Image (cartoon, rainbow, N blue to C red):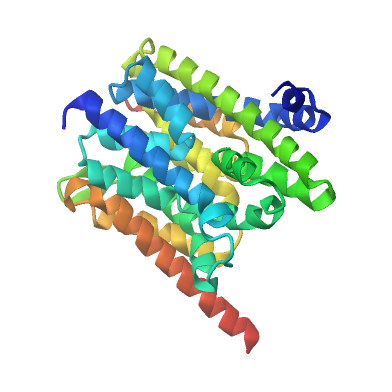
Amino acid sequence: MEGALKLWAVIVAVGALNYASRLSFIAFFARRSMPPLLARALKYVPAAMLTALIVPMIVDWKGAAADFATPRVAGALIAAAVAFATRSTLKTLAVGMAALWLLQWAAA
Amino acid sequence: MRQIVTSRDFREGFVEMLPACIGLTPFGVVCGVGAAAAGADWLASLGMSAIIFSGAAQILAAQLLAVDAPFAVIVLTCFVLGLRFLMYSAAMAPFLRPLPAHWQKGLAFLLTDQAFAAAVRRFHTSEDRHGAGLHFLGCGFALWLAWQASCMAGFLAGNLIPAAWSLEFAVPLCFLALLAPLFRDAPSVLAAATAGIAVLALAHLPMRLNLIAAGLLGIAIGTLADLARERWKAR
Protein backbone atom coordinates (compact mmCIF):
# COMPACT_ATOMS: atom_id res chain seq x y z
CA MET A 1 0.00 0.00 0.00
CA GLU A 2 1.12 3.54 -0.71
CA GLY A 3 2.40 5.49 2.34
CA ALA A 4 -0.26 8.14 3.04
CA LEU A 5 -3.12 5.81 2.15
CA LYS A 6 -1.77 3.07 4.45
CA LEU A 7 -1.32 5.59 7.26
CA TRP A 8 -4.94 6.76 7.01
CA ALA A 9 -6.20 3.18 6.68
CA VAL A 10 -4.36 2.35 9.93
CA ILE A 11 -5.79 5.45 11.66
CA VAL A 12 -9.36 4.57 10.68
CA ALA A 13 -9.06 0.83 11.42
CA VAL A 14 -7.26 1.20 14.77
CA GLY A 15 -9.58 4.06 15.73
CA ALA A 16 -12.66 1.99 14.89
CA LEU A 17 -11.40 -1.08 16.79
CA ASN A 18 -10.44 1.01 19.82
CA TYR A 19 -13.89 2.61 19.81
CA ALA A 20 -15.51 -0.83 19.47
CA SER A 21 -13.52 -2.04 22.51
CA ARG A 22 -14.52 1.06 24.48
CA LEU A 23 -18.14 0.59 23.49
CA SER A 24 -18.23 -3.21 23.96
CA PHE A 25 -19.86 -3.71 27.33
CA ILE A 26 -21.56 -0.30 27.29
CA ALA A 27 -23.50 -1.00 24.07
CA PHE A 28 -22.91 -4.33 22.30
CA PHE A 29 -22.91 -6.67 25.31
CA ALA A 30 -24.84 -4.34 27.62
CA ARG A 31 -27.08 -7.16 28.82
CA ARG A 32 -24.24 -9.55 29.61
CA SER A 33 -21.63 -9.63 32.29
CA MET A 34 -18.04 -10.28 31.40
CA PRO A 35 -16.97 -13.96 31.34
CA PRO A 36 -14.77 -14.50 34.43
CA LEU A 37 -11.82 -15.95 32.49
CA LEU A 38 -11.82 -12.95 30.13
CA ALA A 39 -11.93 -10.55 33.09
CA ARG A 40 -8.96 -12.36 34.60
CA ALA A 41 -6.96 -12.31 31.36
CA LEU A 42 -7.64 -8.62 30.63
CA LYS A 43 -5.96 -7.61 33.88
CA TYR A 44 -2.63 -8.68 32.35
CA VAL A 45 -2.97 -7.00 28.95
CA PRO A 46 -1.21 -3.74 29.94
CA ALA A 47 1.73 -5.37 31.76
CA ALA A 48 2.40 -7.91 28.98
CA MET A 49 1.85 -5.64 25.98
CA LEU A 50 3.77 -2.65 27.39
CA THR A 51 6.76 -4.88 28.21
CA ALA A 52 6.65 -6.45 24.74
CA LEU A 53 6.79 -2.91 23.31
CA ILE A 54 9.48 -1.54 25.63
CA VAL A 55 12.10 -4.31 25.46
CA PRO A 56 12.86 -4.17 21.70
CA MET A 57 13.21 -0.37 21.94
CA ILE A 58 15.94 -0.77 24.57
CA VAL A 59 17.81 -3.98 23.78
CA ASP A 60 19.75 -4.19 20.50
CA TRP A 61 19.46 -7.38 18.55
CA LYS A 62 22.70 -8.21 16.74
CA GLY A 63 22.70 -11.32 14.59
CA ALA A 64 21.61 -14.09 16.93
CA ALA A 65 22.25 -12.51 20.34
CA ALA A 66 20.83 -9.63 22.32
CA ASP A 67 23.27 -6.93 23.37
CA PHE A 68 22.56 -5.85 26.93
CA ALA A 69 25.76 -3.86 27.55
CA THR A 70 24.59 -0.57 26.05
CA PRO A 71 23.91 2.92 27.39
CA ARG A 72 20.22 2.46 26.55
CA VAL A 73 19.85 -0.66 28.72
CA ALA A 74 21.63 1.04 31.64
CA GLY A 75 19.62 4.25 31.16
CA ALA A 76 16.38 2.28 31.06
CA LEU A 77 17.22 0.44 34.30
CA ILE A 78 17.89 3.75 36.05
CA ALA A 79 14.66 5.20 34.64
CA ALA A 80 12.74 2.09 35.74
CA ALA A 81 13.93 2.62 39.31
CA VAL A 82 12.74 6.24 39.14
CA ALA A 83 9.39 5.17 37.64
CA PHE A 84 8.94 2.71 40.50
CA ALA A 85 9.84 5.18 43.21
CA THR A 86 8.05 8.29 41.92
CA ARG A 87 5.32 7.08 39.49
CA SER A 88 5.96 10.33 37.66
CA THR A 89 6.24 10.39 33.86
CA LEU A 90 8.11 13.69 33.89
CA LYS A 91 10.73 12.56 36.43
CA THR A 92 11.17 9.22 34.64
CA LEU A 93 11.72 11.06 31.36
CA ALA A 94 14.10 13.62 32.84
CA VAL A 95 16.30 11.14 34.71
CA GLY A 96 16.21 8.56 31.90
CA MET A 97 17.22 11.02 29.18
CA ALA A 98 19.93 12.57 31.37
CA ALA A 99 21.30 9.10 32.19
CA LEU A 100 21.37 8.15 28.50
CA TRP A 101 23.16 11.32 27.46
CA LEU A 102 25.75 10.94 30.23
CA LEU A 103 26.36 7.26 29.46
CA GLN A 104 26.60 7.90 25.71
CA TRP A 105 29.06 10.72 26.36
CA ALA A 106 31.10 8.50 28.72
CA ALA A 107 31.12 5.62 26.21
CA ALA A 108 32.25 7.83 23.33
CA MET B 1 -24.83 22.43 23.90
CA ARG B 2 -24.34 25.64 25.87
CA GLN B 3 -26.32 24.08 28.70
CA ILE B 4 -23.87 21.20 28.83
CA VAL B 5 -20.72 23.31 28.77
CA THR B 6 -22.00 25.78 31.36
CA SER B 7 -23.24 23.09 33.75
CA ARG B 8 -21.45 22.81 37.07
CA ASP B 9 -20.78 19.09 36.68
CA PHE B 10 -19.12 19.52 33.27
CA ARG B 11 -16.90 22.31 34.57
CA GLU B 12 -15.98 20.33 37.67
CA GLY B 13 -14.91 17.39 35.52
CA PHE B 14 -12.95 19.66 33.19
CA VAL B 15 -11.08 21.37 36.03
CA GLU B 16 -10.49 18.12 37.92
CA MET B 17 -8.60 16.73 34.91
CA LEU B 18 -6.26 19.70 34.43
CA PRO B 19 -3.43 18.23 36.57
CA ALA B 20 -3.73 14.94 34.65
CA CYS B 21 -3.61 16.93 31.39
CA ILE B 22 -0.32 18.49 32.44
CA GLY B 23 1.01 15.07 33.49
CA LEU B 24 0.09 13.63 30.08
CA THR B 25 1.84 16.39 28.12
CA PRO B 26 5.26 14.68 27.84
CA PHE B 27 3.62 11.47 26.64
CA GLY B 28 1.59 13.40 24.05
CA VAL B 29 4.69 15.22 22.85
CA VAL B 30 6.45 11.85 22.40
CA CYS B 31 3.45 10.53 20.44
CA GLY B 32 3.62 13.59 18.15
CA VAL B 33 7.34 13.05 17.62
CA GLY B 34 6.58 9.41 16.74
CA ALA B 35 3.96 10.45 14.18
CA ALA B 36 6.47 12.81 12.55
CA ALA B 37 9.09 10.03 12.47
CA ALA B 38 6.60 7.70 10.78
CA GLY B 39 6.23 10.20 7.95
CA ALA B 40 2.80 11.59 8.87
CA ASP B 41 1.88 15.11 7.75
CA TRP B 42 0.20 17.44 10.26
CA LEU B 43 -3.29 16.30 9.30
CA ALA B 44 -2.47 12.60 9.68
CA SER B 45 -0.76 13.34 13.00
CA LEU B 46 -3.92 15.12 14.17
CA GLY B 47 -5.98 12.21 12.82
CA MET B 48 -3.97 9.77 14.91
CA SER B 49 -4.41 11.70 18.17
CA ALA B 50 -8.04 12.70 17.53
CA ILE B 51 -9.37 9.37 16.20
CA ILE B 52 -7.18 6.70 17.83
CA PHE B 53 -6.96 8.77 21.07
CA SER B 54 -4.69 6.28 22.85
CA GLY B 55 -1.02 7.12 23.30
CA ALA B 56 0.26 3.56 23.43
CA ALA B 57 -1.67 2.60 20.26
CA GLN B 58 -0.52 5.75 18.44
CA ILE B 59 3.13 5.05 19.22
CA LEU B 60 2.84 1.37 18.34
CA ALA B 61 1.11 2.18 15.03
CA ALA B 62 3.72 4.85 14.22
CA GLN B 63 6.61 2.49 14.95
CA LEU B 64 5.18 -0.39 12.94
CA LEU B 65 4.42 1.99 10.05
CA ALA B 66 8.02 3.24 10.19
CA VAL B 67 9.39 -0.32 9.69
CA ASP B 68 6.75 -0.93 6.97
CA ALA B 69 4.97 -3.78 8.78
CA PRO B 70 1.90 -5.08 6.89
CA PHE B 71 -1.43 -3.33 7.49
CA ALA B 72 -3.05 -6.41 9.10
CA VAL B 73 -0.19 -6.88 11.58
CA ILE B 74 -0.32 -3.22 12.64
CA VAL B 75 -4.07 -3.28 13.18
CA LEU B 76 -4.05 -6.64 14.99
CA THR B 77 -1.20 -5.67 17.34
CA CYS B 78 -2.92 -2.37 18.20
CA PHE B 79 -6.17 -4.25 18.76
CA VAL B 80 -4.58 -6.54 21.38
CA LEU B 81 -3.08 -3.48 23.09
CA GLY B 82 -6.56 -1.89 23.12
CA LEU B 83 -8.22 -4.93 24.71
CA ARG B 84 -7.77 -3.24 28.09
CA PHE B 85 -10.65 -0.95 27.06
CA LEU B 86 -12.96 -3.98 27.36
CA MET B 87 -12.15 -3.95 31.07
CA TYR B 88 -12.96 -0.25 31.43
CA SER B 89 -16.07 -0.63 29.31
CA ALA B 90 -17.43 -3.42 31.51
CA ALA B 91 -16.67 -1.43 34.68
CA MET B 92 -18.36 1.72 33.37
CA ALA B 93 -21.39 0.01 31.81
CA PRO B 94 -23.56 -0.24 34.96
CA PHE B 95 -23.05 3.46 35.72
CA LEU B 96 -23.92 4.58 32.18
CA ARG B 97 -26.98 2.34 31.81
CA PRO B 98 -29.50 4.95 33.11
CA LEU B 99 -28.28 7.47 30.51
CA PRO B 100 -29.75 7.82 26.97
CA ALA B 101 -28.13 5.64 24.28
CA HIS B 102 -26.52 8.54 22.41
CA TRP B 103 -24.90 9.71 25.67
CA GLN B 104 -23.51 6.22 26.25
CA LYS B 105 -22.05 6.12 22.73
CA GLY B 106 -20.50 9.56 23.07
CA LEU B 107 -19.03 8.95 26.50
CA ALA B 108 -17.59 5.58 25.40
CA PHE B 109 -15.34 7.39 22.90
CA LEU B 110 -13.78 9.41 25.75
CA LEU B 111 -12.98 6.33 27.82
CA THR B 112 -9.27 6.51 28.69
CA ASP B 113 -7.18 5.31 31.61
CA GLN B 114 -7.30 8.73 33.32
CA ALA B 115 -10.96 9.62 32.65
CA PHE B 116 -11.98 6.13 33.75
CA ALA B 117 -10.37 6.50 37.18
CA ALA B 118 -11.93 9.93 37.78
CA ALA B 119 -15.37 8.89 36.52
CA VAL B 120 -15.59 5.74 38.63
CA ARG B 121 -14.83 7.81 41.73
CA ARG B 122 -17.64 10.24 40.85
CA PHE B 123 -20.19 7.54 39.99
CA HIS B 124 -19.46 5.84 43.30
CA THR B 125 -20.00 9.00 45.36
CA SER B 126 -22.88 10.63 43.44
CA GLU B 127 -26.48 9.46 43.10
CA ASP B 128 -27.14 11.92 40.27
CA ARG B 129 -26.41 9.79 37.17
CA HIS B 130 -26.99 12.60 34.68
CA GLY B 131 -24.68 14.90 36.63
CA ALA B 132 -22.02 12.20 36.79
CA GLY B 133 -22.38 11.74 33.02
CA LEU B 134 -21.77 15.48 32.51
CA HIS B 135 -18.79 15.26 34.86
CA PHE B 136 -17.35 12.40 32.82
CA LEU B 137 -17.91 14.40 29.63
CA GLY B 138 -15.98 17.30 31.20
CA CYS B 139 -13.11 14.98 32.19
CA GLY B 140 -12.96 13.32 28.78
CA PHE B 141 -13.20 16.60 26.86
CA ALA B 142 -10.38 18.20 28.87
CA LEU B 143 -8.14 15.17 28.28
CA TRP B 144 -9.03 15.05 24.58
CA LEU B 145 -8.25 18.74 24.03
CA ALA B 146 -4.97 18.58 25.97
CA TRP B 147 -4.03 15.43 24.08
CA GLN B 148 -4.51 17.10 20.66
CA ALA B 149 -2.43 20.10 21.77
CA SER B 150 0.47 18.07 23.19
CA CYS B 151 0.58 15.65 20.22
CA MET B 152 0.59 18.59 17.80
CA ALA B 153 3.38 20.27 19.79
CA GLY B 154 5.38 17.02 19.57
CA PHE B 155 4.73 16.73 15.83
CA LEU B 156 5.99 20.27 15.22
CA ALA B 157 8.99 19.82 17.56
CA GLY B 158 9.80 16.37 16.14
CA ASN B 159 10.78 17.89 12.83
CA LEU B 160 13.19 20.30 14.52
CA ILE B 161 14.95 18.25 17.21
CA PRO B 162 18.34 16.86 16.08
CA ALA B 163 18.74 13.06 15.90
CA ALA B 164 21.82 13.25 18.18
CA TRP B 165 19.51 13.97 21.13
CA SER B 166 18.20 10.36 20.90
CA LEU B 167 14.67 11.61 21.56
CA GLU B 168 13.27 8.23 20.43
CA PHE B 169 14.46 6.95 23.83
CA ALA B 170 11.65 8.99 25.40
CA VAL B 171 9.14 6.46 24.05
CA PRO B 172 10.22 3.47 26.20
CA LEU B 173 10.67 5.88 29.13
CA CYS B 174 7.02 6.99 28.89
CA PHE B 175 5.94 3.36 28.71
CA LEU B 176 8.11 2.52 31.74
CA ALA B 177 6.25 5.20 33.71
CA LEU B 178 2.96 3.55 32.71
CA LEU B 179 4.27 0.06 33.47
CA ALA B 180 5.79 0.57 36.93
CA PRO B 181 2.51 1.00 38.86
CA LEU B 182 1.22 -2.28 37.33
CA PHE B 183 3.82 -4.40 39.14
CA ARG B 184 1.76 -4.79 42.29
CA ASP B 185 1.40 -8.59 42.33
CA ALA B 186 3.28 -11.71 41.23
CA PRO B 187 1.06 -12.58 38.21
CA SER B 188 1.63 -9.09 36.74
CA VAL B 189 5.39 -9.40 37.15
CA LEU B 190 5.31 -12.88 35.59
CA ALA B 191 3.18 -11.62 32.67
CA ALA B 192 5.67 -8.81 32.02
CA ALA B 193 8.75 -11.05 32.41
CA THR B 194 7.31 -13.63 30.01
CA ALA B 195 6.47 -10.98 27.43
CA GLY B 196 9.91 -9.37 27.77
CA ILE B 197 11.82 -12.63 27.30
CA ALA B 198 9.51 -13.87 24.53
CA VAL B 199 9.74 -10.68 22.48
CA LEU B 200 13.54 -11.15 22.27
CA ALA B 201 13.43 -14.93 21.83
CA LEU B 202 10.92 -14.53 18.98
CA ALA B 203 12.70 -11.58 17.34
CA HIS B 204 13.36 -13.73 14.25
CA LEU B 205 9.63 -13.85 13.43
CA PRO B 206 8.78 -11.91 10.26
CA MET B 207 6.65 -8.74 10.09
CA ARG B 208 7.23 -7.84 13.76
CA LEU B 209 4.85 -10.62 14.77
CA ASN B 210 7.03 -11.11 17.86
CA LEU B 211 5.23 -8.19 19.55
CA ILE B 212 1.77 -9.72 19.42
CA ALA B 213 3.04 -13.27 20.07
CA ALA B 214 4.99 -12.13 23.16
CA GLY B 215 2.05 -10.04 24.38
CA LEU B 216 -0.37 -12.98 24.11
CA LEU B 217 2.13 -15.34 25.81
CA GLY B 218 2.55 -12.86 28.66
CA ILE B 219 -1.21 -12.50 29.07
CA ALA B 220 -1.59 -16.31 29.12
CA ILE B 221 1.13 -16.79 31.75
CA GLY B 222 -0.26 -13.96 33.88
CA THR B 223 -3.74 -15.48 33.74
CA LEU B 224 -2.44 -18.97 34.63
CA ALA B 225 -0.44 -17.55 37.54
CA ASP B 226 -3.54 -15.69 38.72
CA LEU B 227 -5.59 -18.91 38.60
CA ALA B 228 -2.85 -20.86 40.40
CA ARG B 229 -2.61 -18.19 43.10
CA GLU B 230 -6.35 -18.42 43.70
CA ARG B 231 -6.18 -22.21 44.00
CA TRP B 232 -3.32 -21.87 46.44
CA LYS B 233 -5.24 -19.38 48.56
CA ALA B 234 -8.40 -21.52 48.53
CA ARG B 235 -6.60 -24.55 49.98
Nearer the observer, B65 or B136: B136
Q: In this view, does A95 lie above or below B60?
A: above
Q: Is residue B12 above or below residue B114?
A: above
Task: Please provide percent x and percent y for residue A72.
Answer: 38, 35
The residue that appears at 51% across and 54% down in the rendered structure is A24
B214 displayed left or right of A101: left
Q: In this view, does B215 lie above or below B21?
A: below
Whether residue A98 appears in this view of the structure is no
Residue B154 quadrant: top left
B206 displayed left or right of B220: left
Task: Please provide percent x and percent y for residue B112.
Answer: 57, 41
Q: Which residue lies furthest to the top in this view?
A: B160
Quadrant including the C terminus of chain B: bottom right
Nearer the observer, A59 or B179: B179
Residue B93 quadrant: bottom right
Nearer the observer, B196 or B36: B36
The residue that appears at 52% across and 48% down in the rendered structure is A22
Q: Which residue lies furthest to the bottom in this view?
A: B235
The residue that appears at 55% across and 53% down in the rendered structure is A27
Task: Please provide percent x and percent y for residue A85.
Answer: 64, 43
